[in-house]
Image: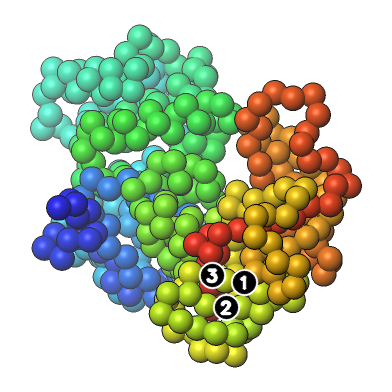
Amino acid sequence: MKKLEPWQNPNIKPYIQLDHVTKSFDGIQTVAPTTLDIYRNEFFSILGPSGCGKTTLLRLLAGFETPDTGKITISNINMTSIPPYDRPVNMMFQSYALFPHMSVEQNVAFGLRQDKSIPRHEIRDRVHNALKLVRMHAYLHRRPHQLSGGQRQRVALARSLIKRPKLLLLDEPLAALDKKLRQETQFELVNIQEKVGITFIMVTHDQEEAMTMSTRIAIMEEGRVRQVGTPQEIYEFPNSRYVADFVGNMNIFEGVILETHPDHALIRCQDTGCDMYINYSGAAPEGAQVAVAIRPEKIMMNKTPPQGYALQNPVNVTRGLVQEIGYLGDMSIYYVELESGKQVLATMPNLVRVAERPINWGDKVYLYWRPENGIILTA
């Protein structure tokens, strides 16, 4: 039997709960009624565009802001009115907020030294262990200005972990790093989280970052959580047009349901000039206006029609003209204009090194897709 994940198991209680939490500033609601369950040892991400309320949600968890309504619970303890310094929570800021006049060792030890009950030898041991964990033990005596961006990030992480919080909040933790270092650090951060066994909640606007690092993701829009799921669920099964359009690239076609069956639907689509046969078990009735979403990598493309192509009443096959091509090394992106004028995005992996592409600018092509690759969106 397949092992259930914590969020799939009704016998496991959430570690962190937000129960109808709201927050407004100057009469404008920044966080609409939000209910979230987060489980022990999760790497949970809150993903959304700038201004969607994700950082406010993080500050509510940290205690830097107080909710207008609702309740925040950590490990079955109501934290709603508890100040930040009394919460089992630490926060790693986007700027890292290291003290410039202190060494790496002093920066990491700062939080422990405020607690007079901890012996000096224990502080020293915990600091050294934390720096070994983030591979910064050799830089004990350096100041922040003597470190690279990636090194400062690891020092800030060590300082955040040193007090052994139950929950670590990360506000855009990789934003200051260049692309290559950011990609390397993503896996490093996940490995550290698994070693220390602390629940991480990260706020980011970087979709790749959230998809790579998270056990689950909450997608936010204008203060509301639109969908919560694993990266695969979010990408393959978006629950709304907003989520489908926000996460990754997506082609969206408008249509009307002609027929519904227990396992599929037939949609009349003016955009594609063909009927769309899509695997579907939803409740939209015949005659309903819907959108069909298809990822660019799910669309197949060829100069010749697919096997079994019917000239009259084709299903899941359309034709167009290649207008633009973007070469990205591992793959190429094709912008194809259909006979209806609709522009479609399709991608093809560059599997072999060839001097000339199999499909080029100005080529007439057939685009087609499998029934399981379309998603019917009713919201």
Q: Position of residue 246 (x, y in %)?
A: 58, 59
Picture layout, residue 276 above or below residue 198: below
Query: Does the CB distance between marks 3 and 1 fall below 8 Å?
Result: yes
Picture layout, residue 191 above or below residue 368: above
Mark nearer the N terminus (3 vs 2): 2
Q: Visible in this render: residue 59? A: no
The residue at the point 57 percent across, 71 percent down is 277
Residue at image mark 2 = 266
Q: Quadrant of residue 200?
A: top left
Instruction: Out of 367 and 146, give the one closest to the viewer.
Output: 367
Q: Position of residue 69 (x, y in %)?
A: 34, 76
Amino acid residing under circle 3? Ile
Count residues near mark 1 (Cα–Cα under 10 Å), then give few for <14, some for 14-19, many for 20+. many
Residue at image mark 3 = 278
Q: Is residue 375 left or right of residue 269?
A: left
Q: Is residue 254 left or right of residue 142?
A: right
The residue at the point 55 percent across, 84 percent down is 259
Q: Quadrant of residue 233?
A: bottom left
The residue at the point 22 percent across, 33 percent down is 196
Asked which secondary structure carries label 2, the reply is: strand
